Amino acid sequence: MSFLALLFALFIEQARPLANDNWVHRSLRAWTTWLSQNLDAGHARLAWTTWSLAVGAPTVLALLVHWSLMFFFGWPIAILWSVGVLYASLGFRQFSHHFTDIRDALDVGDERLARELLAEWQHVAVGTLPRSELLRHVIEHSVLSAHRHVFGVLTWFSLLAALGLGPAGAVLYRMSELVSRTWSVPLGASPGWVSETLQTTGREAWRKVDWLPARMTAVAFAVVGNFEEAIDCWRNHAQRFPDDNDGVVLSATSGALGVRLGGEALRSETDGVTLHSGADLHETQDSESTPGREPELAHLASVVGLVWRTVVLWMVLLALLTLARLLG
């Protein structure tokens, strides 16, 4: 049934995507903000308690609703709940329009507009960023956004749904990412109510939650791309990136597409804090470059193909698993 829920959710999300500032995300951000304001005392143990409440409460709520619907109404209504949760958790169209606008600007040779669009998307200062570096950043942000908004959600959703936990996995992953991003807002761009301890806890928890999805995404990119080069680049160059999970995804992308990734990171327009590739407000550091060709405009089309082939791969795998369960 996971296959049907995902199929309908992807279809609805493509036809009528949620706005970035929709009421679901606003409510969840308000929840995480309220917890940090009321429970953040700068102590490690309390920080983990705060994170557990921020992520665990919505996850448990989604699970209880799923079980209640299964008990009182049966699986058809429970699938509708899973579709709704996936629709709110997936974010394919929340970043794809940025990618499309930048690609269209570069396609007509308007690099100034492309830089402005990238700065608006990631809230960074781009200055006179060279064309190859502009393309590199677009590729990195797009691939990591696809991972966090689509493939990471699918990994945890599929895993926990197979255990009878409904859409709880999608909520767990999305809330872990949201909490980490919300609590990692640079102090110059926020009221400054998040302690360093709580920020560190949010980042550590996010790395643990994202460990498996990052490697699943890397394997999928290798399968639908250049397998040998993707695996080789993953094994030998993932450590060049400051974040282990991002490094796995980006190095596999680099090998799968044969493109150079990694290098100087973009900086926040407000306070000079480096932004995390693919996220809105995460700190990171510069990285070393992977081997490969200089990024070109044609690589953007390759990224689109890589992402959609990976989506198809996921759908085929879930369809086969669903068929096996029905026949078994």
Image (cartoon, grey):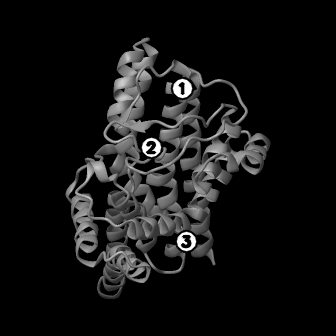
Distance Cα–Cα, label 3 vs label 2: 33 Å
Position of residue 228 measured from the top left corner of the image (x, y, whole percent): 79, 43
Q: Residues within 10 Å of mark 1 (few under 14, many from 20)?
A: many
Mark 1 and mark 2 in contact (Cβ < 8 Å)? no
Q: Which residue is mark 3?
A: 159
Residue at 51% x, 58% y: name it: 152
Position of residue 198 measured from the top left corner of the image (x, y, whole percent): 39, 70
Residue at 30% x, 47% y: name it: 17
- Residue 18 visible somewhere in the drawing: no
- Residue 186 visible somewhere in the drawing: yes
Q: Which residue is mark 2?
A: 274
Q: Which callout, 3 or 1, points at the residue further toward the start of the chain?
A: 1
Q: Amino acid at mark 1?
A: Glu
Residue at 54% x, 49% y: name it: 311
Position of residue 96 measured from the top left corner of the image (x, y, whole percent): 40, 38
In this view, the residue farthest toward the top is: 109
In this view, the residue farthest toward the bottom is: 71
Say which of 320 and 191 sits in front. Answer: 191
Q: Nearer the viewer, mark 3 or mark 1?
A: 1
Distance Cα–Cα, label 2 vs label 1: 16 Å
Q: Residues within 10 Å of mark 3 (few under 14, many from 20)?
A: some
Q: Amino acid at mark 2?
A: Thr
Instruction: Give above or below for 247 relative to 226.
Output: below
Q: Which residue is mark 1?
A: 133
